[in-house]
Image: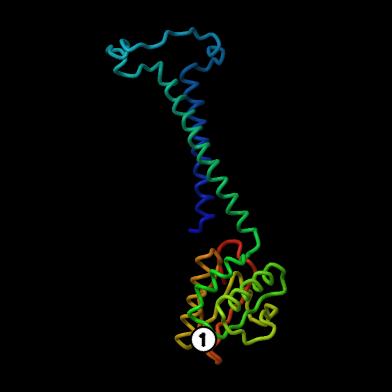
Amino acid sequence: MSTSAGLELAFAAFTVLTILANAVVVFGLYLEYGPNPFRLVRRRRTRLLTKRDFKTESLRLLPKSHIGSVLVIIGVAGEVLFGAATLVVSTKLETQHQKQLAPRDLSLDEQRSLGSALLDFKGQPIVVMTYSEFESTWFADELAAALKAAAQWNFISTPEVRVVRPEEIGAMVSGIMVTSPADDKGKQAATALINALSKRGFCVGYPATNPTPPPTVSIIVGFKSRHGICM
């Protein structure tokens, strides 16, 4: 289950619990004051309980006349508790939605960090492709900069980021799709790239083996995945 799905489920659950707590309050008020609502206004004041009262036999069992009051207290406490939990989950859910809608981005520090994690595969041949769409192209350029300057991978195409149409690839890519070559070092480089990007919260597809030479890692930066599903 994805983080968003879990938060949405929690939000629904706490909302239902809050409604149930309200129902308990209503039922408690009914037991306490009966069907006549004006009894709430006309009810006589009672004295406060003392320590001596709690030592008497009469308070060992809860009198029926107090059941409504107890239910009201429980219901109000449930409203406060579940209302607060609903607010927390709602805030997290809103943050998650904003994150899903925000464009992908690699800051300069993140580019250096990503490159450092892949520096062991210095010189690895690579091709980066993307669609003619602003968000995808922007992120592909940042990713290419990290792989070239920091990781020192070898781009075999000019320009370094190729803009392609979906029909040229044969599929509509959502997220980032990485294809590894058949050699062991290329596979290790592709796996390291996927792990580094996934660790930073990007939706990345698993590497597939490219049956044809040269032994080049291929990256397709597709449209941003809105639901954490890469394909």
Q: Residue at x 48, y 75 (%)?
A: 192
Q: Residue at x 41, y 16 (%)?
A: 65
Determine the image quadrant of residue 156. Answer: bottom right
Determine the image quadrant of residue 212. Answer: bottom right
Which kind of residue does numbered mark 1 sit on? Pro
Disc tally is 1
- Other residues around mark 1 within 10 Å, as few (<14) / some (14–19) / many (≥20): many
Q: Nearer the viewer, residue 144 or 30?
A: 144
Q: Position of residue 73 (x, y in %)?
A: 45, 25
Q: Residue at x 58, y 61 (%)?
A: 227
> In the structure shown, which secondary structural element does the residue marked by tag 1 occupy?
loop
| Rendered position, 209 above or below 43 | below
Q: Nearer the viewer, residue 174 or 219?
A: 219
Q: Nearer the viewer, residue 159 or 207?
A: 159
Q: Position of residue 78 (x, y in %)?
A: 47, 32
- Residue linked to disc 1: 181
| Rendered position, 183 above or below 100 | below
Q: Position of residue 61 (x, y in %)?
A: 31, 18
Q: Is residue 71 left or right of residue 42?
A: left
| Rendered position, 104 above or below 212 | above
Q: Residue furthest bottom?
A: 213
Q: Position of residue 138 (x, y in %)?
A: 68, 70
Which image quarter holds the C terminus?
bottom right
